[in-house]
Image: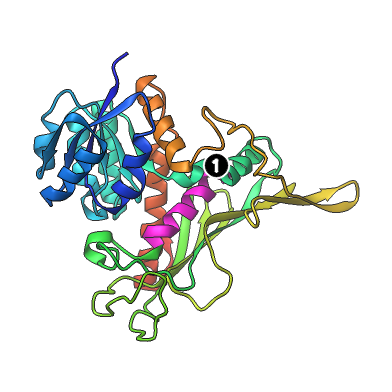
Amino acid sequence: MAKTRIGIIGCGGIANGKHMPSLAKVPEAEMVAFCDLIEEKAAKAAKQYGTPKAKVYTDYRELLEDKTIDVVHVLTPNRSHSVITCDALAAGKHVMCEKPMAINSEEGKKMVDAAKKYGKKLTIGYQNRQRPDSLYLKKEAIDGTFGDIYYARAIAIRRRAVPTWGVFLNEYEQGGGPLIDIGTHALDLTLWIMDNYKPKYCLGTAYHKLNNDIDQANAWGKWDPAEFTVEDSAFGFVVMENGATINLEASWALNTLDVREAVTQVSGTLAGGDMVGGVRINGVRNGRQYVLQPDLNAGGAAFYDGDGDEEPSVREAKLWIKAVREDKDPFVLPEQAFCVTRILEGIYTSAKTGDIYRF
């Protein structure tokens, strides 16, 4: 069977740091086209990761005209995710779009609708589902260990780690700051483990408290306060249709020592689970409280196709290409990612209006 031919749209940080190195480890795939507004970036990527005859573009629409391309990875700033994805689906390509799905639910719905209309696969880059702790916690949820999960925390908190490159600080291009950047991972994990995608209402707050700090001590160097137009922290209280509650916490810069990123904590009628020190399961058995902490360093099954000890981004790439080649549903369904986008939009809207947002 011929290799799956992939076109890369956007050859910046996330392409070089995650997607292209991961796809290079998928034997069934090959990268044959590269597009970036800065031609030198596309050319460099083609030389490093492409086939000998890989093509270079500065206009993604020209790349989409190549009928031999099977799959497109959309790795551009958030604002352009929807339009490029929809164009790619219309051109007959399967699409992996980097998270978040879109800057708002209107744009996200266009993506879901386009995938259905053109009969192509669409997935979003939530690779944190592929971590050993995530997979273990999900398996416990599937097995019924937690019972009815009615409370959860989605946590993405940094003390001082504001990304100072690219357009991360630009609200127009990104649609927001830490909530849409790292909070989206924590929320995706939480909804996935709960298997609950029906939000009822939410209340949110967003803060611009540390944007103008001069004494920053930032992990990635000083940020320019004039360019820091997104929130530095945002928090949400989400109630689902079945009454379950999710607290979402996201920050790039917060005065706290409780620093955890892209993790979840769930509490159910039978037990609870979190990602402190790996995975901890807590409950009551035989009249005694217990804590179970499995050794995730000992190796083991991933509970899904693939090697559980592979890097999450490599597992994501392999499962994605496998889904395309075998005509299976992708690991991350577009409808699931759309729910994440809806909730993020609800929290941002509530933060601006000061009112409850109803879905």
Q: Amino acid at mark 1?
A: Asp
- The C terminus: image quadrant: bottom left
Which sits in the foreground, 324 or 188?
324
Horizontally, residue 117 falls left or right of residue 221, namely: left
Mark 1 surroundings within 10 Å by alpha-carbon count, few (fewer than 14), some (14 through 19), many (20 or more): some
Which x, y percent locates residue 45? 22, 43
Quadrant in the rendering for residue 87: top left
Which x, y percent locates residue 240? 52, 52
Answer above or below: position of 279 versus 117. below
Coloration of the structure image? rainbow
Which sits in the foreground, 205 or 265?
265
Which sits in the foreground, 259 or 121?
259
What's drawn in magenta, residue-wise? 179-195
Residue that badge 1 annotates: 195
Q: Say if the magenta span includes residue 295.
A: no
Which sits in the foreground, 304 or 349?
304
Residue 37 visible in this rendered orientation of the protein: no
Residue at 48% across, 47% down: 128
- The N terminus: image quadrant: top left
